[in-house]
Image (cartoon, grey):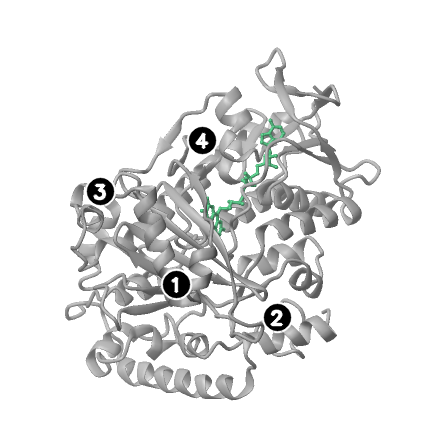
């Protein structure tokens, strides 16, 4: 093995493999003389997971970073705009039970104690509705920009819903034709270690040995290199987050003019929840549930009822769901020797806040930004990577659990068990006590690159019905007036945006016909 890190071999051609390859190749001019060479080895025998349709606003940066045209991406990946999530039925399960977790930060966030003033003067209004324009845009199915807004620029902060299969093909085409990524379609049958214990090469069915200096394990649930070869232990998080199964279906719209929702809808069920994602040509719907609390048959009944209620009896009768099982959790470390795992090979936890693709983007960016020049530098980078992602997994587990622990639903063991103190991470338990008198803030989430900002905790906490008791936070003179000013600003912004932004389908059709301006 050469001392310089020049040959980067990505194993796996799912979203993780192609995003990692694209970000590293774009950052290091893969294939250019003297530059690192990125190779993707993808099995023709093992299909990609084929789900994963909700993203975060970070995806805009990632696509821009690898030089994609947003117009082409939207056209080719059947993509639509996502402005956050709407949670239905999580608090009581009653008819009016819903709240938003929008992507936009509250108006005036950190500049006044919005929470104290919300409670003092507007407690009858949902927190997100008072401080953000975005729930209002979502309710009316509005797009986050206009046709004249340049590619990747936002009027309202946004991410995408996309077709996972088409996204993989789109990334493969872009990586191989524009970013100099070498593509080998072959099944990896073995791993060849060097004397040092590093991986020297992969053994393949048809291409012999493929040597490398750094191996990126993107083999999904197989975790062939990190889990299989290195036997890095798997850390189960099922004691906190019970869901381990999903049933996924694709449902047609009633007609081609049907509105496209602006947010992912997550609807609570007796033993899990159902995601509903609107793409331009169809909806992606799936039931995530806990096999310890229900059976596949019961889960399918719940899914069928949901589809019947939202798309009609014919759609429900026609559906044939695909079952996916998973172990919620992650590896004990993510970068071991000269192997780093990205995507499901590193870990997977239910897609409640669509954090998987975001973690892939963060992993790919860190590998590319800190790519060791030599093997000698690699252990330092690996330590940093492991520390950073161990922290991120902890925060993801905390944040997802926050969606469950405040529920008043008591109709099934699933919801009762979710509220058992023993299933709640200690740090989250402590914060829930602290948040009785203080809103979530940067002091609770001190890192500059926190995976979820404190605003997200506020949206979910107060959306779930948590009400702070009288705040003991120091309030500066004039704080109440400042907060009122931000509420007025938010209302004015809402009116302006509602007057100027088209519906999702209208904008997507315009993009299809004319494209957006490239910056
Ligand atoms: C039910 C469900 C819903 C989800 N929803 C979301 C969501 O809304 N948002 C989100 O961000 N994420 C979501 N995810 C997660 C998301 O789907 C994945 O994180 C993403 O698709 C990345 O998958 P991957 O590339 O790691 O693995 P895969 O897509 O499984 O790809 C694995 C690759 O490894 C290759 N491979 C395997 N073995 C070998 C071998 N021996 N030799 C060579 N190649 C091999 C395969 O051929 C394949 O190309 C969801 C996941 C599930 C299960």
Residue at x-position 33% and y-position 48%? 299
Which of the two labelled residues, at mark 4 and mark 1, occupies the earlier sequence position? 1
Please count the marks in the image.
4
Q: Mark 3 or mark 1, which is nearer to you?
A: 1
Q: Which residue is mark 1?
A: 308
Task: Establish if 13 lies above or below 153.
Answer: above
Report, in whole angstroms, how far the alpha carbon at label 2 lies from the one at label 3: 41 Å
Q: Mark 4 or mark 1, which is nearer to you?
A: 1
Q: Secondary structure at mark 2?
A: loop
In the picture provided, is 65 more to the left or to the right than 474?
right
Disc marking residue 162: none
Q: Secondary structure at mark 4?
A: loop
Which of the two labelled residues, at mark 1 and mark 2, occupies the earlier sequence position? 2
Residue at x-position 44% and y-position 42%? 323
* In the foreground, 18 or 7: 18
Q: Mark 2 or mark 3, which is nearer to you?
A: 3
Residue 113 appears in the rendering: no
Residue 473 in percent (x, y) is at: 22, 68
Residue 361 appears in the rendering: yes
Q: Which residue is mark 2?
A: 153
């Amino acid at each position: 093995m050469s001392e310089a890190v020049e040959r980067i071999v990505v194993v796996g051609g799912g979203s993780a493999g192609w995003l990692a390859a694209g970000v590293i190749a774009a950052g290091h001019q893969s294939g250019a003389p003297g530059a690192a060479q990125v190779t993707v080895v993808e099995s023709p025998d093992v299909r990609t997971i084929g789900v994963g349709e909700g993203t975060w606003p970070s995806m805009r940066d990632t696509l821009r970073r690898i030089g994609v045209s947003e117009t082409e991406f939207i056209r080719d990946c059947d993509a639509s705009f996502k402005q956050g999530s709407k949670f239905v039925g999580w608090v009581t399960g009653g008819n009016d039970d819903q709240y938003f977790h929008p992507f936009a930060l509250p108006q005036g966030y950190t500049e006044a104690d919005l929470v104290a003033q919300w409670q003092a003067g507007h407690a009858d209004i949902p927190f997100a509705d008072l401080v953000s324009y975005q729930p209002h845009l979502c309710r009316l199915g509005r797009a986050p920009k206009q046709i004249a807004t340049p590619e990747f620029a936002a009027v309202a902060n946004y991410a995408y819903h996309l077709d996972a299969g088409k996204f993989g093909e789109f990334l493969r085409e872009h990586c191989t034709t524009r970013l100099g990524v070498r593509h080998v379609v072959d099944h990896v049958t073995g791993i060849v270690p060097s004397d040092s214990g590093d991986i020297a090469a992969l053994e393949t069915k048809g291409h012999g040995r493929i040597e490398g200096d750094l191996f990126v394990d993107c083999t999904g649930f197989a975790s062939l290199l990190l889990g299989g070869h290195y036997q890095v232990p798997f850390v189960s998080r099922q004691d906190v987050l019970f869901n381990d199964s999903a049933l996924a279906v694709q449902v047609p719209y009633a007609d081609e003019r049907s509105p496209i929702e602006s947010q992912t809808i997550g609807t609570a069920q007796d033993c899990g929840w159902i995601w509903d994602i609107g793409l331009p040509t169809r909806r992606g719907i799936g039931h995530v549930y806990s096999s310890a609390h229900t059976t596949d048959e019961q889960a399918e009944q719940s899914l069928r009822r949901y589809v019947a209620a939202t798309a009609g009896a014919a759609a429900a009768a026609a559906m044939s769901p695909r079952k996916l099982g998973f172990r919620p959790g992650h590896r004990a470390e993510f970068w071991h020797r000269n192997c780093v795992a990205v995507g499901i090979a590193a870990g997977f936890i239910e897609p409640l806040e669509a954090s998987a693709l975001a973690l892939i983007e963060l992993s790919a960016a860190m590998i590319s930004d800190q790519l060791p020049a030599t093997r000698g530098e690699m252990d330092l980078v690996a330590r940093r990577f492991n520390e950073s992602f161990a922290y991120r997994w902890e925060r993801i587990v905390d944040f997802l659990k926050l969606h469950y622990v405040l529920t008043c639903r008591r109709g099934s063991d699933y919801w009762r068990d979710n509220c058992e103190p023993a299933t709640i991470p200690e740090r989250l338990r402590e914060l829930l006590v602290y948040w009785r008198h203080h809103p979530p803030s940067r002091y609770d989430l001190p890192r500059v690159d926190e995976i979820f900002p404190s605003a997200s905790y506020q949206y979910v906490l107060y959306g779930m019905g948590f009400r702070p008791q009288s705040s003991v936070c120091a309030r500066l003179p004039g704080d109440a007036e400042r907060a009122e000013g931000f509420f007025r600003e938010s209302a004015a912004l809402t009116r302006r945006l509602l007057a100027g932004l088209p519906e999702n389908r209208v904008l997507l059709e315009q993009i299809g016909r004319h494209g957006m301006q490239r910056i």
